[in-house]
Amino acid sequence: MHIEHVEEAADPRLADYRNLTDTALRRVQEPAGGLYIAESAKVIERAIAAGHTPRSVLTQERWVTGLETLLADVDVPVHVVPDDVAEQVTGFAVHRGALASMHRPSLPQLSEVLRDARVVLVLEDLIEHQNVGAAFRAAAGLGADAVIVTSRCADPLYRRSVKVSMGTVFQVPWTRIDETSAGLEELRSAGFAIAALALSDDAVPLDAYAADRPERVALLLGTEGDGLSHMALEAADAIVTIPMRGGVDSLNVASAAAVALWALTSGMG
């Protein structure tokens, strides 16, 4: 790494970090130029460990020493700025040590992601980045082998998604499918049974489905509010529901993913 002290918010070297508020970035599915922003030293460390390459790092003087080991073998400019410049540039108080502008890697083919998988999580059109990040964290912690996101699903590499996931978006293999119907057909051709998590009068309770689960399962969850599309429900081999109490009919989508994954993987050893 090589240190560059930057004193002006308008400096062109800081262009990757300018106006990175949630509202501004939510307008685009993925940051322009094939980049994403990793926030905090821990997340940057996990991204580099996963083979991702930083283009630059933005930090403040008090965090430089902690980055020296992390970036010792990385040829990257580290822009050291005063606190007020960091906030002017990004639109928020940078207090987690560092931001890194990372080159976005090419996504693998679906067949590659599925090759050795037994349980995969399929996220259809989730629009909340924090729910995508929380779903990845559940996938990593509860034994999903991969995550598949649809074309309209929020970006797993968006700053909020990465932060909520605690960097597990770099740990779990994932890819994006352009056409949901084609992706589900490829899953079925690879030997996956498609289990749609949804409310339905003829739905199978999760515990009953897990007790006799297929060898390979794709757990399909839909967008916040409306849930799964009619196409996805029609494509499913089974509709599965989590039995609820207290007059509650459903859970947050990421919480539902965690409960379902625990049920499907807890007996697998």
Image (cartoon, helix red, strand yellow):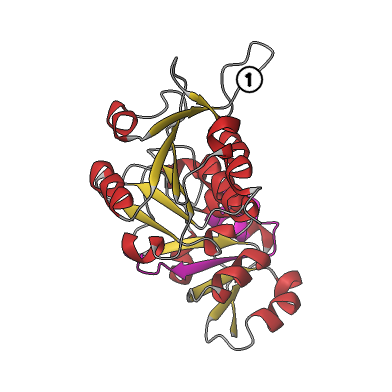
Q: In screen coordinates, is 29 left or right of 58?
A: left
- Magenta stretch encompasses residue 14: no
**Which residue is depicted at the point 57% across and 34% down?**
256
Most distant residue in the front direction: 212
- Magenta stretch encompasses residue 99: yes
Q: How many marks?
A: 1
**Which residue is depicted at the point 62% across and 37% down?**
259
Q: In screen coordinates, is 106 left or right of 1?
A: left
Q: For residue 236, which quarter of the picture?
A: top left
**Which residue is depicted at the point 39% across and 48% down?**
149
Q: Secondary structure at mark 1?
A: loop
Most distant residue in the top direction: 247
Measured from the top left, where is residue 184 in percent x and y?
30, 45
Q: Nearer the viewer, residue 29 or 77?
A: 29
Residue that label 1 marks: 244
**Which residue is depicted at the point 43% across and 42% down?**
123
Write the start and end of the magenta stretch as one range: 85-109
Residue 33 visible in rendering? no
- The quarter in which the C terminus is drawn is bottom right
- The quarter in which the N terminus is drawn is bottom right
Q: Nearer the viewer, residue 68 or 148?
A: 148
Measured from the top left, where is residue 65 in percent x and y?
75, 79
Measured from the top left, where is residue 28 in percent x and y?
35, 47
As drawn, 235 above or below 264:
above
Q: Nearer the viewer, residue 36 or 175?
A: 175
- Classify mark 1: residues with Cα within 10 Å, few (<14), some (14-19) or many (20+): few
Residue type, numbered disc 1: Met
Q: Nearer the viewer, residue 156 or 203?
A: 203
Measured from the top left, where is residue 11 in percent x and y?
48, 68
Residue 229 visible in rendering? yes
